[in-house]
Image (tube, rainbow, N blue to C red):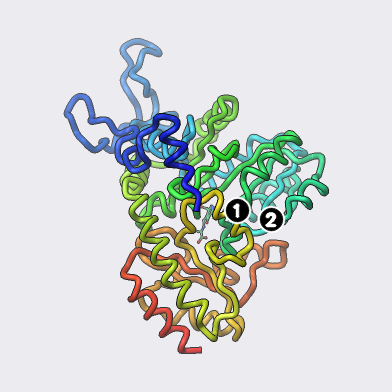
Amino acid sequence: MGDTETETGAERGLAGFSTRAIHAGQDPEPTTGAVIPPISLSTTFAQDGVGNHKGFEYSRSGNPTRTAMEIQVASLEEARYGMAFASGLAAEDNILRLLTQGQRVILGNDAYGGTFRLISKVWAPLGFPWSAVDLTDLDGLRDNWPSDTGMVWLETPTNPLLTCFDIEAIVSIAHERGAIVVVDNTFATPYLQQPITLGADIVVHSATKYLGGHSDVVGGFVATSDDGLAERLSFTQNAAGAVPSPFDCYLVLRGVKTLAVRMDRHCENARAVVDLLVDHDAVERVLYPQLPDHPGHEAAAKQMRDFGGMVSFTLRAGRDAAMRVAAATSIFTLAESLGAVESLIEHPGAMTHMSAAGSPLEVPDNLIRLSVGIEDAHDLVDDLAAALDTI
Ligand code: P1T
């Protein structure tokens, strides 16, 4: 397992990950001493004279609660700049605005269905071509590089197949050819993987997931250390205005404080679930980056601290059995989304990835995806075993 964050953080003189999660951007409030950043609901801020203000003018452009959270999450990504958005897809849409018409997006051939829909159904008709590429095949990427490529967009681990891509290697290929690299770090979180330290230009998050961590806030986040990209991204953040509310920012800020302890438990519980699945007769294949035969296992072992809380698997008995198992658990709740304290189960083909049907990103119809929560591992294993027995 890699442990790049702690080493890199220490080398750079940064405080440890959880210290930053709990303190970065969160100095006690100067007038009252409040230890927790207040939820600043004011939409506007008084000026002493025209243009003479205390750093805030209007809450779409900047808000103190949002700033606290932006500093906190950017610090965890070891990025110089962070920008919060109303959802993960709003954050993604803001990044795609960096392209000029005619520039291509190379998308990893497994990704969240909504990301695929945004790129292929919203941006492509406006004149932004895209291709789905197997980014585990680095020679193929080099040899078949479309000359109009402006951006490589990848998730690692991917949603829902959990394939892992070698960020450093892809960055080197893309940069040699003049393209920028965007890494969706939603599944790994900055606790397990920090793409900016591996050369990625931009990191994007659905903060709805592990950052928030409690299934009670929809949000997005963009981080970068590039001055020029940050200037353009923050210009559009304000100009297009897809910003989160102060209350939503507070919920993410609060969730992130416990990210490290939650992720350790997610990973531990995921391993217990994987142990059940790999030995189960009904299971055709288990997809988890720690398994030595998993696509991208080596990349994951190199660039991640641990292997995450998401587990997918296919069933020998096919689609209908997958549908039945997804509805048969009692602790795992049948629902979309992921990354929170409670365990969720879903059928990607009919739920989160329905928009990818018939495309190169279509997922197997006997696939089940688990977001393994932080309940007691033995309860999760028993619940899943009982559901598999219904086949
Ligand atoms: O839902 P939203 O906050 O807009 O984030 C979109 C998004 C972006 N990137 C990844 C990797 C994601 O998984 C998501 C959202 N995914 C789900 C809702 C899901 O159940 O897979």
Between 339 and 287, the one lying in front of the other is 287
Nearest the eye: 40 or 158: 158
Query: Does residue 53 appear in the picture of this structure?
Result: yes
Do tag 2 and tag 1 residues touch (Cβ < 8 Å)? yes
Which amino acid does the dot numbered 2 rest on? Thr
Q: Is residue 200 left or right of residue 241?
A: right
The single residue placed furthest to the top in the displayed view is 49
Answer with left or right where residue 377 lies relative to residue 363: left
Q: Residue at x 39, y 59 (%)?
A: 340
Q: Extreme bottom residue here?
A: 390
257 or 44: which is nearer to us?
257
Residue 308 versus residue 377 in the image, above or below: above
Q: What is the number of callouts on the image?
A: 2
Of circles 2 and 1, the one toward us is 1
Residue 159 picture location, percent across and down? 57, 60
List the single residue furthest toward the left: 32
Residue 136 image label: 2
CB at disc 2 and ligand 1 closer than 8 Å: no
Q: Secondary structure at mark 1?
A: helix
Residue at left offset 46%, top offset 79%:
327
- Say the numbered circle drawn on residue 299: 1
Residue 382, quarter of picture: bottom left
Q: Secondary structure at mark 2?
A: loop
Q: Quadrant of residue 35?
A: top left
The amino acid at mark 1 is Ala
Instruction: Name which residue lies at 35% across and 71% down.
Output: 377
Relative placement, left or right, of 369 versus 144 is left
Q: CA distance from mark 2 to mark 1?
A: 9 Å
Q: Give the mark, 2 or 1, whose residue is nearer the N terminus.
A: 2
Position of residue 358 relative to residue 329, above or below, is above
